[in-house]
Image: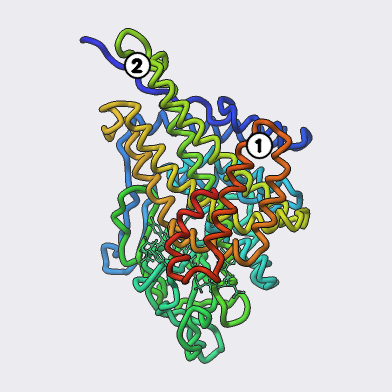
Amino acid sequence: MGFLQDAPQLAHPHRSDRLLIALLDRAFPSKRRKALDADLDALGDYAQMAWERASRSARRKPILTQWDAWGRRVDRVELTTAWMEGPQLTTRHSILASGHENHEHARLEEFTRAYVYHLASEFYTCPLAMTDGAATAIKASGNKTLIDRALPHFLSRDAQNFWLSGQWMTENAGGSDVSHTETVAVQDAEGQWRLYGRKWFSSAVVGEAALALARPEGSGTGAAALALFYVETMNGDERKPELMIDRLKDKLGTHELPTAEIHLDGLLAWPLGELAHGVRQVAPMLNVTRTWNAICAVASMSRAISLVRDYAARRQAFGRPLIEQPLHAQTIADMQAEFEGAFALAFEVAYLLGRVEQNAATLQETASLRLLTPLAKLWTGKMAVNLCSEALECFGGAGYIEDTGLPQLLRDAQVYAIWEGTTNVLSLDSLRALAGNNSFAALRKVISGWLGDAHNAQAAFAVHAALDAAATHMDAQKLERNVLEAGARGIAISLA
Ligand code: MFK
Ligand code: FAD
């Protein structure tokens, strides 16, 4: 046998991540570190095991069985191993529960755990994100009955008691624009609400609950007439017959995630609040899942660079390891710089979210959070695709070969820019945030603090320039709405 190339090895996603450790050292009081470090170590161990396990086994997808041998509708979904391990692992390490503790580091604790776990989870983090978002929206609704009913499950530290929640918004007629939602909510003879309709994408189809947008019968057209409902999907171990899984989507990536088309035929539902303005009520969920998206996009970048770096030390070309080739080293350094910027932005959002939720934030921080959430989601989503593409090239031909496990990084990354609001939809959302929340003043105040620091002064000038450009562009006296919107992506990307 001739030359055999060593495969890339995955460095420990906690203990070997300089950036993560710097964040932990900077942001966390030492009394909070012990338990957190233990969880991050364990999740990092799991991630290394999962990477190694994936290299030994063929990839699997979830399988939907709609009918049993005797013709009974069962809609059973067989999940992959990592998905079966998800409830035990994530409750044992308190991923969701840690985010809802009553201290201002809670969200950072949660998102550092999610960051270390994400790639090994095979996108089990997607329904985790939605469950977290559902808990946040239900809390924000103040609906005590639903808080008492759902949150002990969503935030449980015991796998037996744990429930996942879906987020049922997108229909055939629109995902960005939900104003044509066809699902209707009808009150039955007992006064119970029941949902009838079709949801076109449901990514937590194995979940025990969901938040769903629906149109109360007779409430009129448009988005403002939509209400937000809480539903439960199971009768004990069996799926409720009023929820049917029509099929699983055949997707470009996120193959292990069972994303389904579903039908609702009288599924019992409870409104979160008033029977209108469902989009306003679901907004806390959107902002939390968008934060998850940014953190997970950054985790994909981290994984890609970690493997690239390892491989560059193992692979030789033109008489020396790739890492000693100046241009290859520069390529990796450029990727690292982009990744570090994305990491800083995503975790800044997590930090601000924690402070705002604990009423510890200044007005500037609250306004910054509203703007930085869509910016972080849209920018990290795009960067993850670019960076994973570059990473594949760093492996040469091996980066294009399925059973190296590398192409999956790129295919999976493509989703970050699409779900939870596309790049364009979030660019428009950023404009709304800029227009409505004193965000200009807030950001200028935040970055003025950077000017005293030589490392940050250049960045501060760049953000000032981007804000000036945005302010000029947004001067509604001068611009038609069409022109304003056409420039939204440029503004959002340069601000991010
Ligand atoms: C592994 C990574 C983890 C990620 C998991 C992802 C799982 C994937 C699941 C999904 O993809 S679920 C589907 C996600 N769908 C979207 O994100 C929808 C994208 N479209 C938008 O975001 C549109 O902008 C929107 C639907 C919100 C537009 O609807 P409307 O009714 O035309 O909204 P409008 O009038 O802009 O806002 C209605 C209210 O909500 C306003 O408040 P008021 O009624 O008080 O005026 C807005 O201020 C408020 N609002 C909207 N977006 C908000 C918000 N408030 C705070 N933050 C926001 N982001
Ligand atoms: P459209 O809204 O039709 O958008 C098409 C294009 O038009 C996009 O490029 C968009 O940016 C652009 N566009 C739209 N409006 C504007 C505008 N005003 N200005 C400029 N450009 C615009 N949804 C759920 O509700 N629950 C789920 O669990 C879920 N899981 C998903 C899982 C996967 C793997 C995927 C891919 C999607 C999932 N979705 C889910 C759906 C997802 O949220 C939507 O696909 C997304 O919001 C976009 O909606 P759409 O597909 O209808 O595209």
- Image quarter hosting the N terminus: top left
Q: Position of residue 487 (x, y in %)?
A: 45, 59
**Depth order, front residue of 138/463:** 463
Question: What is the quadrant of residue 88 in the picture?
Answer: top right
Residue at position x 45%, y 32% in the image: 335
Name the one closer to the observer, 264 or 75: 264
Q: Quadrant of residue 221?
A: bottom left
Camera-nearest residue between 159 and 308: 308
In the image, 38: left or right of 47?
right
Q: Which residue is mark 2?
A: 315
Between the residue at mark 1 and the residue at mark 2, the CA separation in whole angstroms equals: 39 Å
Q: Which mark is residue 457?
A: 1
- Rendering quadrant holding ligand 2: bottom left
Q: Nearer the viewer, mark 1 or mark 2?
A: 1
The amino acid type, in three-letter code, at marker 1 is Ala
Q: Residues within 10 Å of mark 1 (few under 14, many from 20)?
A: some
Percent x, y of residue 139: 67, 65
Vertical order, 47 against 151 (above or below):
above
